[in-house]
Image (tube, rainbow, N blue to C red):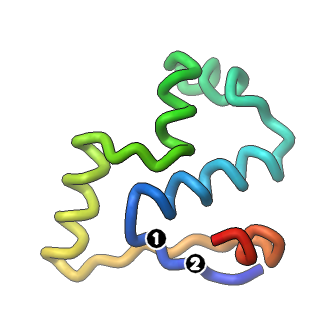
Amino acid sequence: MRSARVTSPETLGRILREARLSNELTQDEVADYMDVNRRYVIELESGKPTLALTRLFEYMRATGVTMYTEISDDAQAKL
């Protein structure tokens, strides 16, 4: 496992997708759990910069907050 710095919606999307796949979950299963439609999960995984995510990353940059997550070595190669 390695630590990856999350600095953009795109990076977060790749990490979320890899986490879903490593847990052998479908997008529909994640959407059902979140009580959202599958399209929302697709948008998160594609790194589509929603207003909420854009604001979150602006806030992090303004305050110097960083976000890290542990990812598998296989996922690291894809980031």
Q: Are marks 1 and 2 in contact (CB under 8 Å)?
A: yes
The local secondary structure at tag 2 comes to strand
Query: Where's residue 8, x and y in %?
Result: 38, 64
Q: As drawn, is 73 to the left or to the right of 50? A: right
Kindly identify which residue carries mark 1: 6
Residue corresponding to mark 2: 4
Please tell me whether residue 30 is drawn above or below residue 46 in the rendered image.
above
Q: Nearer the viewer, residue 51 or 35?
A: 51
Q: Residues within 10 Å of mark 2 (few under 14, many from 20)?
A: some
Q: 52 or 78: nearer the eye? A: 78
Mark 1 to mark 2 CA distance (whole Å): 6 Å
Q: Helix or strand or loop: what does disc 1 sit on?
A: strand
Q: Quadrant of the N terminus?
A: bottom right
Q: Amino acid at mark 2?
A: Ala
Q: Residue at x 55, y 26 (%)?
A: 34
Q: Residue at x 58, y 21 (%)?
A: 38
